Image: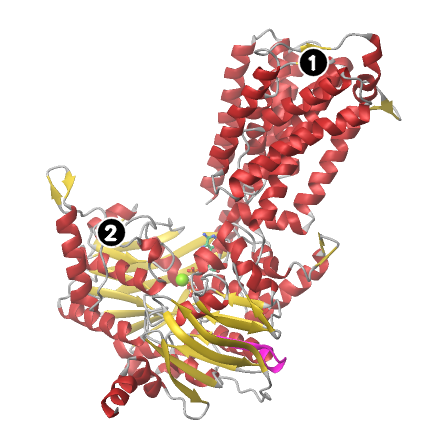
Amino acid sequence: MTAAAIEMRSINKIFGPVKALDDADLVVEAGTIHGLVGQNGAGKSTIIKILAGIYRRTSGNVSVFGKPLDQITPASIEAEGVHFIHQDRLLVPTATVAEAIFLRNEPRVGPFINYREMNRRASELLKLYFELDLDPRTLISELSTAQQKIVQITRALAHDAKVMVLDEPTAALVSREVESLFSVLRRLKTDGLAIVFISHYMSEILEICDVVTVLRNGTDVGVVDPSEVGIQKIVEMMTNRDTSEMYPRREVEIGAPVMSVRNLTVDGAFEDVSFDIRSGEILGLTGLLGSGDKEVLNTLFGQIKPDAGEIILHDKQQKFGSPVDAVNAGVAKIPEDRRAHGVATGLSVGENMSLASLGQLSTRGFVDRKKEAEVVDGLIRDLGIKTPDRHTLVKNLSGGNQQKVVVGKWLGCNSEISLLDEPTVAVDVGAKVEIYNLMNRLASEGKGLVFVSSDLEEVTEMCDRVLVIYRGKIIGEYKRGEIDADRLLAAASGAVAETERKRA
Amino acid sequence: MTNQTDTAVRESRFSLEAASNYAVIVAFIAVVIFFTFAAPGFMSGENIFNLISNKVVLLAIVALGMTIVIGAGGIDLSVGVSIDLSSMIFIMMIAAGYMGAFAVMGGLGAAFCVGLLNAFLINKLKINPFLATLGVLFIGKSIQQLSTQGGVPIYLTRAEYAAPFDAIARTSLLGIPTPIIILVVCIIGVYLALHRSVFGRYVAALGAQADVARYSGIRVPFHMSIVFISCAVLSGITGILLSSTVRSYVPLAGDAFLLDAIGATFIGTAISAERRPSVLGTLIGVALLAVMRNGLLLIGWNFFWQQVGIGVLVFLVLGLSFGLRKRAE
Ligand SMILES: Nc1ncnc2c1ncn2[C@@H]1O[C@H](COP(=O)(O)OP(=O)(O)OP(=O)(O)O)[C@@H](O)[C@H]1O
Ligand SMILES: [Mg+2]
């Protein structure tokens, strides 16, 4: 028998008071797609980062294609042909798309980078793998989270990998992009690559993985074939409990409009968008990448100034010059880009969670630390945030737990309107239910919520009404009962618009 | 069995981490003990008293201002200008026969204007704090030279001028000299602002990630203005204390405080686990720098060798602290 592509045995990792990995094993064979699942904080990213040479293991053995590796550095592991798409290592924001894809592998003429060649090959690769038309000279900082993921994946593909490790690559990707990623992964698998795939979406695990290692509290509790044992069983192994009630129901009387949007237009992004958000309502907004749904949300939060149209809140026309105005008018937003806008990773869990609601948690300008502790500890408990305590720095939390901090920060401040841009990205099954519960609680208190998500299932299950945006225009509105994922997808990809055009 | 080794590893890591936070304090104590034996006269009441009321007070107040600015993710290179302009206006007003209280307000007002100018450059013209305050530093130097015929000090020696100076620098309350009382008030004020108030949280958020602060609904320009104005006014207080101690205004005298204030703040970050500026840390940084200068002077090192000694100490302390921390991880 040939040696496994990756063999990690009895891995332990201790961070100060936290035992992140406890005798964990991970063995991946060449020519397979190997799933790695577990709740937030189970240790998935940690075991990956140990393999990547970002963290040093406290103890344990690692070998790649039968070759034991003692000291691993990011460069040495790449030399073994192992490539990574990390959950939280971003690309250099000031680099261009082409520079990011060919970093450390630039086409050269003598000592100089051949920019023309590099740009040409970059757009070729993006087209080839993802059918994405993206100017290779665009700056990374101008890309959406989804586009950045695609660039990262393309980079690994450009580097001729033998093993590819993807830590939550599909978070924030819409289904079409996920499909193209999966067809790429399947192709690589038949080429004999070993692929490690981390995801919180069980349907994806079932669809693409041949084997799954389940981590719980830093230990591998099972290696199973997902199509044999089924999703339910895997989730049970992860959580050690039964989570059947995925989408909690609410019975809320939907009331008068809280916010009205009239003929809102941002040139080049969307035009003539009008809708109401009613009290007690969860309104979905969905569209393909670049359709303008995110921009609508950003405009409602004052990040973009509208070129025409109005936003009416509290019976008053609002001119949001910046997010500050929006927050003061009672609008909260869970931003899509957690790292840039959501949490300050250098601050503690508590400082982050209270940052947007210090007004309510202070008397005469002084922080009421008792009240703050109560509120923050309550949220940590409700959302099941895995952290030693509220004083821990956010950068020491796992990705999903950082996301829960953002959710807690905004849902804790009781705003009239909450704009939720991918609030459950990177969050595990159990915590998703808690976030849904918080959303329902806000709705039942008469607040209005706008929900944008690339996970159509949760849009379908959670929303009272869904607006579909296609090329910057609202082209469909579906009420609860008429909403189903296929219909939304068809509308979002323009199928409805096309048939209507044909009819006309 | 494995469990036992785990706890052992855990504990040793814990203590390494703790040790990294205490490195500065340990260094301070070591330096004090060293000079107690090496420099006769170091531990005398008179020396300690002079050290505190002359050196420590002046530097500490500026460093407190710098702590606010660095805490908010900025830097203020123009503290010297705030010190000097405050001192210059104060002395000129005394010379012109104004009451001491008005002269103090005039001096602080001048410092306030420096802070306001910084805030304007940073918020409105979007110049980064380093360049904005560097520009103000250049302009401030020229203003002083132009208004003193190229840098001639203003000495006030006549008896009728003495009263306001004495009131600030030479009186005492309940046996505690006025400058020390002023320092204590400043410490308490900045401590409450930075570590207990909403403003302090906003400062920390600005320092950690300004975008997150903005997206949390914090008025970034407003708070940045408060930050820079506070620093300038605190420096202005030092300016007035300085000129009342020496009964004169010496152009560009404030420059000497800039690097020490920045140094003390950064040395101070080593005491907190998050490596953030803090009031306590800065005060320890100030004390360490002041003791080093004074001790080295007493054992006969001249100014230039003092600088070398301090540089080496800073490397040792910060290297030890950050190195231990790295090991702990
Ligand atoms: N640098 C660090 N310092 C201290 N603790 C850490 C650090 N990195 C991770 N941890 C802790 O280790 C545990 C495992 O984290 P890890 O990031 O591996 O989780 P994960 O399985 O990837 O979760 P998620 O699904 O949320 O991404 C968590 O409890 C986390 O708080
Ligand atoms: Mg992770």
The CA distance from mark 2 to mark 1 is: 60 Å
Q: Chain of mark 2?
A: A
Q: Which residues are magenta?
A: A442-450
- The local secondary structure at tag 1 comes to loop
In the displayed structure image, the side of residue B169 where residue B216 appears, left or right: left
- Subunit of label 1: B
Give the foreground label among 2 and 1: 1
Going by the numbered disc 1, the residue's amino acid type is Phe
Residue B198 seen in render: yes
- The response on whether ligand 1 sits within 8 Å of label 1 is no
Residue located farthest toward the front when viewing the structure as drawn: A308
What's the residue at 56%, 87% (across, down)? A250
Which picture quadrant has residue B277?
A: top right
Quadrant containing ligand 1 reads: bottom left
Q: Which residue is mark 2?
A: A68
Q: Residue A10's x, y, as percent? A: 36, 59
Q: Amino acid at mark 2?
A: Pro
Residue tagged 1: B42
